[in-house]
Image (cartoon, helix red, strand yellow):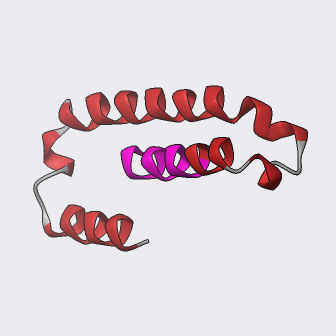
């Protein structure tokens, strides 16, 4: 979630600097959506920390690599 959030922020900053690419009205609400995605990441992080058995095995490492590469 946090990785995706930073992608959205990068896109948002690009759109703010280059308004000619804001071709759809929905981009006016993009900043709020980015903040919402950040809160999802915070919630998911807290959820995973409460369940450490899901964080410390080989599957978790593979998922982490997948999300970092995607």
User: Where is residue 46 drawn, in percent x and y?
Assistant: 27, 28
Which of these two is toward me, 58 or 15? 15
In reply to whether residue 5 is colored magenta, the answer given is yes
**Which residue sits at x=36%, y=73%?**
69
User: Where is residue 2 drawn, in percent x and y?
Assistant: 38, 44
**Which residue sits at x=88%, y=51%?**
23
Location of residue 49 with respect to 63 vertically, above or below: above
Residue 29, picture quadrant = top right
Q: Principal SS element in the magenta part?
A: helix
Which of these two is toward me, 14 or 59? 14
**Which residue sits at x=44%, y=71%?**
70
**Which residue sits at x=56%, y=28%?**
36
Instruction: Check the picture and name the quadrant holding the N terminus.
Output: top left
User: Where is residue 8 drawn, in percent x and y?
Assistant: 55, 47
Residue 62 shown left or right of residue 39 in the figure: left
Q: Which residues are magenta?
A: 1-11
In reply to whether residue 54 is colored magenta, the answer given is no
User: Where is residue 11 drawn, in percent x and y?
Assistant: 59, 51
Which of these two is toward me, 3 or 24? 24
């Amino acid at each position: 979630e946090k990785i995706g959030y930073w992608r959205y922020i990068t896109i948002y900053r690009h759109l703010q600097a280059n308004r000619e690419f804001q071709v759809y009205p929905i981009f006016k609400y993009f900043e709020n959506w980015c903040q919402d995605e950040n809160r999802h990441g915070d919630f998911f992080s807290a959820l995973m920390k409460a369940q450490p058995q899901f964080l410390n095995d080989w599957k978790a490492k593979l998922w982490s690599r997948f999300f970092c590469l995607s």
